């Protein structure tokens, strides 16, 4: 068998934190050698405009291939289309629930479903707070199905100086979960033992 194609599906849903999806696409460009396939939910486009003042053309320019949400016949809707996996950044609770319950009702959730059924890595940057029991149960369900729930949580032990530092850390952790080498964030060197 040949090695898996170096492609990554990136989903951007409507939760706050559209910057995570944008930074992920930019990081993939910096890494090089990975073809990015982007799909954005309708609410994701609204959040991109509201939080980042980004229009479709600007976001499209960051990806190698862009797929329309309604096109459930796109390449990424099939398990025969090889990828390294998929990241949903950010992942809304609506998108999480659809994935948890196998509701492949649009291309984003279908691509996530395909990622799971093909036993590829699916990383979900789940964004919500506080969480109710339904959210937690959906997180358990997708974890049991093989997904990695990776909420974008600040790492204050790294002493971030800017919002970008915080964003880069979360995107770096998503890339780590996929086994993609990067230079987006520094590695923790550890602390010396205290006397």
Image (cartoon, rainbow, N blue to C red):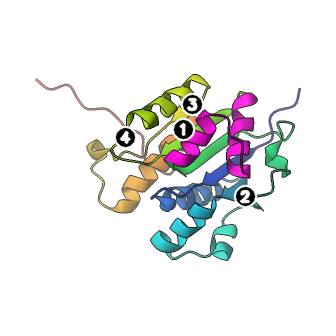
Cα gap from disc 2 to disc 3, whole angstroms: 21 Å
Instruction: Kindly indicate whether the residue at mark 1 contacts the one at mark 3 (C-beta within 8 angstroms).
Output: no
Find disc 4 in the rendering and name its residue: 131
- Give the structural element (helix, strand or loop) at label 3: helix
- Residue 115's spot in the image, x, y percent? 71, 36
Q: Is residue 72 above or below residue 134?
A: below
Of labels 1 and 4, the one closer to you? 4
Instruction: Kindly indicate whether the residue at mark 3 contacts the one at mark 4 (C-beta within 8 angstroms).
Output: no
User: Mark 3 or 1 closer to N-term?
Assistant: 3
User: Mark 1 or 2 closer to N-term?
Assistant: 2
Q: Which mark is residue 142?
A: 3
Cα gap from disc 3 to disc 1, whole angstroms: 19 Å
Density class for disc 3 (Cα within 10 Å; few <14, some 14-19, many ≥20) is many
Find disc 2 in the rendering and name its residue: 69
Cα gap from disc 1 to disc 2, whole angstroms: 27 Å
Q: Nearer the viewer, residue 122 or 105?
A: 105
Exactly how many numbered labels are in the figure? 4
Find disc 1 in the rendering and name its residue: 176
Q: Quadrant of residue 161?
A: bottom left
Q: Residue furthest left?
A: 195
Q: Is residue 53 visible?
A: yes
- Give the structural element (helix, strand or loop) at label 2: loop
């Amino acid at each position: 068998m040949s090695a898996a194609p170096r492609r990554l599906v990136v989903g951007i849903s409507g939760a706050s934190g559209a910057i995570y999806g944008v930074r992920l696409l930019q990081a993939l460009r910096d890494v090089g050698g990975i073809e990015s396939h982007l799909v954005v939910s309708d609410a994701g486009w609204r959040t991109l405009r509201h939080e980042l003042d980004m229009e479709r053309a600007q976001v499209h320019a960051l990806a190698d291939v862009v797929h329309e949400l309604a096109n459930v016949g796109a390449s990424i809707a099939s398990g025969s289309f090889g990828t390294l996996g998929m990241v949903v950044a950010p992942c809304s609770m609506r998108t999480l629930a659809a994935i948890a319950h196998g509701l492949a009702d649009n291309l984003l959730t279908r691509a996530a479903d395909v990622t799971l059924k093909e036993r590829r890595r699916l990383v979900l940057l789940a964004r919500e707070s506080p969480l109710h029991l339904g959210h937690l149960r959906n997180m358990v369900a997708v974890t049991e199905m093989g997904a990695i729930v990776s909420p974008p949580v600040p790492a204050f032990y790294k002493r971030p100086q800017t919002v970008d530092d915080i964003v880069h850390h979360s995107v770096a952790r998503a890339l780590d979960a996929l086994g993609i080498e990067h230079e987006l964030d520094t590695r923790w060197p550890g602390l010396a033992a205290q006397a």
